[in-house]
Amino acid sequence: MNSNTSDLIERMHRQMMEQMPSQLLPPDTAPTIHFTELPPATPGNPVAAEWNYYRREAGRLLAEGNEGRWVLIKDEQLLGIWDTQDEAMAEGYRRFFRQPFLVHQIQERERLLRPGYHQRCN
Amino acid sequence: MQLTFPVHADGLTLTVLVGLNHQEATTLVQAGQPVPAPLWKTAVIDTGSNVTCVSGATLQQLGVSGTGQGSTQTASGALAVRLFQVSLGIPLFGNPPGSLLLNRQLTVMELLSAIPNVDVLIGLDILLTGRLLLDGPVKQFTLEF
């Protein structure tokens, strides 16, 4: 690449920079999913019943003012709501040690998990 | 605490320990049962991941039960994923002897599919608690917490 071409490329980039609209900046918000769009559990998931029960009940739990709190669910039974994950987990381990149970935070919008560059194409 | 590692041919890889979480280990001790030893696993630093991920094989080997659910976005739409609570230790080979960066109760996502030679993706949930410095020409990276 000669210097004239190099200059041309730099000039073009600089021109585009000057015209850059502000909306091209990356968003400063993490992608989320609304509770009504939560996907069903995948087949074979040991807490499928618990998760699908939560998906059905999330609207009611939110309407009752529980946003941000943590539920403990076993089978299709809501066993309690706690302020912290640690409290809900401790109760889960106490009652169902080495058995499947679900502890989940009640949120209107949940952050979408992004498992890295390696797994984008699934 | 500052930890320096060499950059390997396969990227920003390091050896970590994955074990039961603090609450689960405590419950086992109280029940008079043995606590399985943490497992040596290969991890890679992945700034594209917003959650630390562990392979299903590792989670199965540890015998931990999934206690959480999350959602991720794939090409074919939103997908439910399993979440687990584990402990994660990063031993500091070549750093001060006995140094260990330890997270006793960490929520991790089960990897959607196996990655060759990698069991753990260390994501931004851990990295954003400290500093990551990549020195490409010297072929080393530093974690500072």
Image: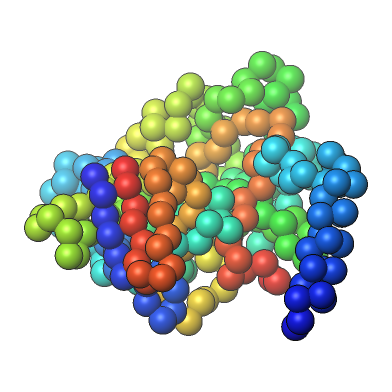
Query: Relative to A58, is B26 above or below?
Result: below
Whether residue A89 is visible, yes or no, is: yes
Give the camera-side residue of A74 and B121.
B121
User: In the rendered image, which quarter is residue B49 located in?
Assistant: bottom right
Give residue B112's position: percent from left, percent from top.
Answer: 58, 67
For the N terminus of chain A, the image quarter is bottom right
Give residue B38's position: percent from left, percent from top.
Answer: 23, 62
Residue at far top of view: A65
Give residue A19's position: percent from left, percent from top.
Answer: 90, 47
Residue drawn where x is 48% and y is 24% of the image? A82
Give the camera-side residue of B5 and B75.
B5
Query: Relative to A11, is A2 above or below?
Result: below
Task: State left or right for residue A84 relative to residue A119.
Answer: left
Give the camera-side residue of B128 and B4.
B4
Query: Relative to A79, is B113 above or below?
Result: below
Task: State left or right for residue B61 relative to residue A58.
Answer: left
Whether residue B65 is visible, yes or no, is: no
Residue drawn where x is 34% and y is 52% of the image? B143
Query: Relative to B16, is B57 above or below?
Result: below
Residue drawn where x is 16% and y is 46% of the image? B29
Give residue A30's position: percent from left, percent from top.
Answer: 68, 41
Residue drawn where x is 74% and y is 41% of the image? A27
Task: State left or right for residue B126 relative to residue A78.
Answer: left
Give the camera-side residue of A56 and B138.
B138
Residue at far front of view: A3
